[in-house]
Structure formats: structure tokens, C-alpha cells
Image: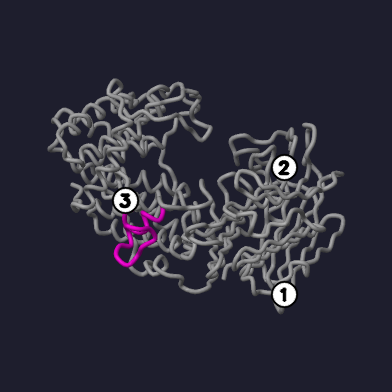
């Protein structure tokens, strides 16, 4: 049972009342405006009835302890459980569709994650509210959970898909323990052992430093810490909890309240009350990222109760000094390509980059934060094809504190808007526009934004921070490269325009298309000049060098486009002639 103080209960009821307004008595589900990430569903409806959200709401209704809400929860449970595929001969056995309006056989394709998401909610009912629902409904809930477990076990998601790997482990582990299902529990414990080893060996989650998915993982880890009893399992779960909080704490820029980059997956570049509320409630007394009356609690907040280890609380309470965080979060010893991330955190700013990455919409391979908590500013480097992030753009960066040297190329065997859902055919796209963009969110024009570039260079001074950028080399076939500064929708765009005009086919095979640049962010008092960077070019290779005092950043990169593998192998960065991603 969820225990809440009087103050917490009042906060919970306020959150629940917002959900009450969404309830559709006719369909016995919540009704929300339709939204989707663009895959799995073909729906175009204005409003939909989501299965997962309806189950979350049912749990909250039972948590309220209010009789009329208990009856409503029972109606919802009966309705949503009836939408689960319970035919063992079907591939979709044990899962739900996203929406009541779109059955599983109409989805494109069905989402097997819904066994995990919906099973997780039903477990809250079975574990905490058995005495508050009729016996036949409890048996239906239990049967539905076991069907979801069978789907999870059949799919057997590996540890590389962090949040679903953790969530499926939680559902099967808790269901096996709660119902005395030895086969399910044995499977789940073995899966947890593999999950633990995989992540401990790598040192971080695969969805590295993701504000979205780290938090999703930590929420399910907290559920396990609250509900699982097996001591050996708890030891491993605590290790995973420590890993997630360590990554978040070490990347938290306390002066702006932002989650510093780089981010493997991110849906919102600037964080705010939702994240700050979760941190503040987890850390407890001594932390006030928000005034108490502005803290946002959801219907699951006090059921989950995130657990921040004591040793990381100080990172949220105060600025802990300038520091560099470097992570090689996929090791060469794993048999895969190593993945390297670096972040420098200063009192006035933070900047994070991946050594080698792409420009997928959810990726933040080059991102900086400065400003204040009241008005944070984000700078992000993007590659845009007709205004949307082009996944086949690649970037190699070497970073030292606020200095970043980058080389940008284009892969011939990648995707367009997504890494693998809409692959580019024959290395050719149709395009009206292709550009690189430094997008600055939250910066006001009065902060001294210049109206134009000067010889491929631009600089901006904002309060305590200065930004300097120099494009050292840029080519895109026979096109003339143009530079433009724009202010649209409250954002500043510093654009490097590779092509803009009538729509035409662009074939990247053997195309000379690349760009190298030097970027600096630092205190207004720091005297670092990006114009000191140089590049040396031959027929096939660009060597970009930036020396500052006794430190030399260097990147060797190809002039022409190539496959992801070719670009990965041929783009090599160095700091003082030592390869940047060398395990050390």
C-alpha cells in the first residue's frame, strides 16, 4: 500500500483531479488529444483512449482510498484488460494496442513494449489493492499479468535496450515473487544478473545520459527497491540505481538547473519544473530547486519514490567546482565499437560532446548550456534536411574544457528522419535545403547577437559567457557555401547553408561534402581565439588542428562521404597525439 503524509496526499489529489477531467464514462477509459512519435500507429483522430494511461489512472484511483473512485477503477480494469490479446497462437499474445480506437491488427506495427508498460500498472493493483477489488476481478488482473509475462519472456529483450530491459525484468521479477511463480521468477533473476553484468561492464546505460530514459529507468529501479524482497536481487538493483543517479548528478549543472550533455536520447533540450520536482522530492530537505508551492507531483510520484543515494545529493544542492566528466560507456572489450562522451562543467556554463555520433533528432551530440536557472540558454548543433534533423549526418568531435574541434560528414547507408526506420536509398535524397545549424534557445537579441557571419566566423557575448565559432573548411559538391543568422520563434539560428533552392536529388556517393569547425565557450574573461585553428587538405583527407598553449586538438577526417563504418574508422581525433577514445 502507498503511504502518504497529509501534505503528500493533498498534492496527490490535486494531480488526480487533473486526470479526473480526462475520464470518459462511456468508454470507461481516459480520453486525450492524439499524439504519436510517428510510428506504430496510423491513427489521425483528434482524440483517443490510451490503454496504458487508463491503467495508470486506475491505479491512482485505488490509491486515493475514495469509494466512488474504487468503483471507477474496477470499470477501467475490466475494460482495458478486455483489450489484451489472450490468444497464445498469436504473435501479439499478452500485449495491448496503444489506443482503444486502433486494435492490434491495425497498428503499424504493434508495440511489444505494451506488455511491459501495462503489466507494470496491473502489478500495482495486484500487490496493493487485492482486498479492494472483487475476487473475480483480482483473478482477471492476475491472469492478465501472467499473459504479459509470457510475452515479455518470449521476446526476451536484451540489456542493450535499457528501459525496456529494466521494465520487463521488474514485471517478471515482481510477478514471479508476488504470485509464487517459480519459472517466471527464475527467468527474471537470470535476466537481472545479465542486465547487471552488462551495465556494470559498460559503466553506464546504453541510452547514455538520457534525461528521458535515465529517469524512466530510475523510476522502475525505485519500484524494484520498494517491492522486491530477494536480497541478492536487491544488491544488483542498488548498483543500477547508483549508476543512474551518478550519471545524472555528475552531469547536473546546478547554476542553470540543466542536465548537461551529451545526450544519447533527448526529447526536450531545456529541462524545467518536471525534472526539478523529481530531484527535489528525492533529495529531500536541504534542496530547493523550486519554491515548495511550485513542486509538481504526479499521480505516481509517491508510489515510485525515487531514491537518490546520499553521496550524490551535494551535486544538486550546490555547484561542486569545475570538472570534466569523460565516459567510455561502451568498451572495445565488449566486441563493439567503443562509445565516448565528454562533458565540461563550469560555474557559468557546461558543454558536452560525443566523440563520434550522428544527427538523429533525439541525439544531442554537441550541446551547451549557460544563463541562469530562471532563464537557461541552450546551444545545440543540428544537421537539417528540409528543416528536419538528418540522421545520416555524422560528427566527430574532440573536446578539452570549453574548446571543441569538430568534423562533419555524411553517411551513404543511413536513415533520413530516423536511424533505421526510413533508410536512404541508393545514397540519394530529394532536398530543397540542407544545412548545419547552431540553434540557440533562450538567448535574447539584446545579448549582442551579430547580424551576420564574418569570413566563416562569429562570436556572441552573453553576460558571463562568450561563444566563438570558426568554420575552417566546408564543401558540398560544387555548391557555394552560405552563412546566415536568423531569429525565429524566440531562437537564434547560426546557419551554414550547404544547399538551398529548387528540390533536387542529391547523391552522397563519392560526393565531396564535409565541414570542420572550431568552437569555444568560456568565461567572458578567457582569452581563447578560435581563429588559431587551421586545416590542411589533400585529395582524400582533412587534418584540422587547434593549438592552445601546450595542448593540441587534432582531427583527421575524409573529404568524401562514405558508409557509417568507413567514416567511423577514418575520422580519428587526438589530444596531444593521443587518440581521444583510448580506454584509460
Write the start and end of the magenta stretch as one range: 275-293
Q: Nearer the viewer, mark 3 or mark 1?
A: 1
126 relative to 217, above or below: above
Is 499 on the left or on the right of 223, as rendered?
A: right
75 relative to 254, above or below: above
Mark 1 surroundings: few (<14), some (14-19) or many (≥20) residues within 10 A: few
Is 293 on the left or on the right of 270, as rendered?
A: left
Report the Cα–Cα distance between label 3 and label 1. 52 Å
Q: Residue at x 71, y 69 (%)?
A: 553
Q: Which disc, if any, is residue 548?
A: 1
- Mark 3 falls on what kind of element? helix
Residue at the front extreme? 446
- Mark 1 falls on what kind of element? strand
* Quadrant occupied by the C terminus: bottom right
Q: Disc 3 marks which residue?
A: 189
Q: Quadrant of residue 449?
A: bottom right
Q: Disc 2 marks which residue?
A: 412
Q: Quadrant of residue 309?
A: bottom left
Residue 419: in magenta span: no
Residue 278: in magenta span: yes
Name which of mark 1 and mark 2 comes first in the sequence. 2
Name which of mark 3 and mark 2 comes first in the sequence. 3
Amino acid at each position: 500500500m502507498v503511504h502518504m503524509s497529509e501534505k503528500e496526499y493533498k498534492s496527490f489529489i490535486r494531480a488526480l483531479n487533473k486526470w479526473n477531467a480526462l475520464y470518459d464514462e462511456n468508454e470507461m477509459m481516459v480520453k486525450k488529444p492524439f499524439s504519436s512519435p510517428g510510428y506504430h500507429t496510423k491513427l489521425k483522430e483528434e482524440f483517443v483512449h490510451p490503454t496504458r494511461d487508463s491503467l495508470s489512472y486506475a491505479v491512482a484511483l485505488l490509491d486515493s482510498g475514495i469509494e466512488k473512485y474504487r468503483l471507477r477503477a474496477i470499470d477501467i480494469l475490466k475494460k482495458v484488460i478486455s483489450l489484451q490479446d489472450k490468444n497464445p497462437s498469436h504473435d501479439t499474445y499478452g500485449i495491448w494496442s496503444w489506443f482503444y480506437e486502433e486494435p492490434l491488427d491495425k497498428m503499424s506495427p504493434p508495440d511489444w513494449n505494451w506488455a511491459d508498460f501495462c503489466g507494470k500498472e496491473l502489478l500495482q493493483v495486484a500487490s496493493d489493492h487485492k482486498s479492494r477489488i472483487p475476487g473475480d476481478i483480482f483473478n482477471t488482473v492476475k491472469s492478465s499479468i501472467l499473459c504479459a509475462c509470457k510475452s515479455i519472456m518470449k521476446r526476451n529483450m536484451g540489456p542493450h535496450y535499457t528501459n525496456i530491459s529494466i521494465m520487463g525484468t521488474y514485471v517478471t521479477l515482481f510477478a514471479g515473487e508476488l504470485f509464487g511463480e517459480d519459472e517466471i521468477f527464475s527467468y527474471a533473476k537470470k535476466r537481472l544478473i545479465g542486465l547487471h553484468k552488462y551495465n556494470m561492464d559498460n559503466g553506464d546505460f546504453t541510452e547514455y545520459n538520457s534525461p528521458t530514459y535515465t529517469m524512466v529507468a530510475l523510476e522502475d529501479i525505485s519500484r524494484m527497491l520498494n517491492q522486491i524482497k530477494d536480497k541478492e536481487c536487491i544488491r544488483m538493483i542498488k548498483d543500477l540505481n547508483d549508476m543512474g543517479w551518478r550519471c545524472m548528478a555528475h552531469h547536473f549543472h546546478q547554476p542553470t538547473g540543466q542536465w548537461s550533455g551529451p545526450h544519447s536520447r533527448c526529447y526536450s533540450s531545456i529541462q524545467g519544473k518536471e525534472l526539478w520536482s523529481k530531484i527535489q522530492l528525492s533529495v529531500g530537505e536541504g534542496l530547493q530547486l523550486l519554491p515548495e508551492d511550485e513542486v509538481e507531483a504526479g499521480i505516481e510520484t509517491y508510489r515510485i519514490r525515487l531514491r537518490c543515494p546520499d553521496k550524490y545529493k551535494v551535486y544538486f544542492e550546490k555547484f561542486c567546482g569545475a570538472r570534466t566528466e569523460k565516459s567510455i560507456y561502451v568498451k572495445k572489450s565488449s566486441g563493439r565499437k567503443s562509445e565516448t562522451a565528454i562533458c565540461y562543467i563550469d560555474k557559468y556554463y557546461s558543454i558536452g560532446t560525443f566523440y563520434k555520433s550522428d544527427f538523429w533528432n533525439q541525439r544531442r551530440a554537441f550541446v551547451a548550456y549557460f544563463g541562469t536557472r530562471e532563464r537557461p540558454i541552450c546551444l545545440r548543433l543540428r544537421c537539417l534536411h528540409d528543416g528536419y534533423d538528418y540522421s545520416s549526418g555524422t560528427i566527430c568531435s574532440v573536446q578539452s574544457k570549453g574548446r571543441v574541434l569538430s568534423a562533419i560528414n555524411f553517411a551513404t547507408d543511413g536513415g533520413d528522419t530516423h536511424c533505421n526506420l526510413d533508410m536512404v536509398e541508393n545514397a540519394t535524397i530529394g532536398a530543397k535545403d540542407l544545412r548545419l545549424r547552431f540553434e540557440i534557445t533562450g538567448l535574447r537579441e539584446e545579448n549582442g547577437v551579430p547580424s551576420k557571419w564574418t569570413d566563416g566566423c562569429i562570436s556572441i557575448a552573453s553576460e558571463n559567457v562568450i561563444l566563438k565559432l570558426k568554420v575552417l573548411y566546408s564543401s558540398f559538391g560544387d555548391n557555394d557555401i552560405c552563412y546566415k543568422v536568423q531569429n525565429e520563434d524566440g531562437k537564434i539560428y547560426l546557419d551554414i547553408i550547404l544547399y538551398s533552392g529548387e528540390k533536387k536529388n542529391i547523391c552522397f556517393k563519392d560526393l565531396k561534402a564535409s565541414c570542420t569547425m572550431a568552437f569555444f565557450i568560456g568565461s567572458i574573461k578567457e582569452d581563447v581565439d578560435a581563429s588559431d585553428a587551421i586545416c590542411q587538405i589533400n585529395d582524400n583527407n582533412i587534418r584540422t588542428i587547434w593549438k592552445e598553449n601546450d595542448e593540441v586538438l587534432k582531427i583527421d577526417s575524409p573529404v568524401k562521404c562514405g558508409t557509417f563504418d568507413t567514416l567511423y574508422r577514418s575520422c580519428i581525433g587526438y589530444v596531444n597525439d593521443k587518440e581521444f577514445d583510448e580506454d584509460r
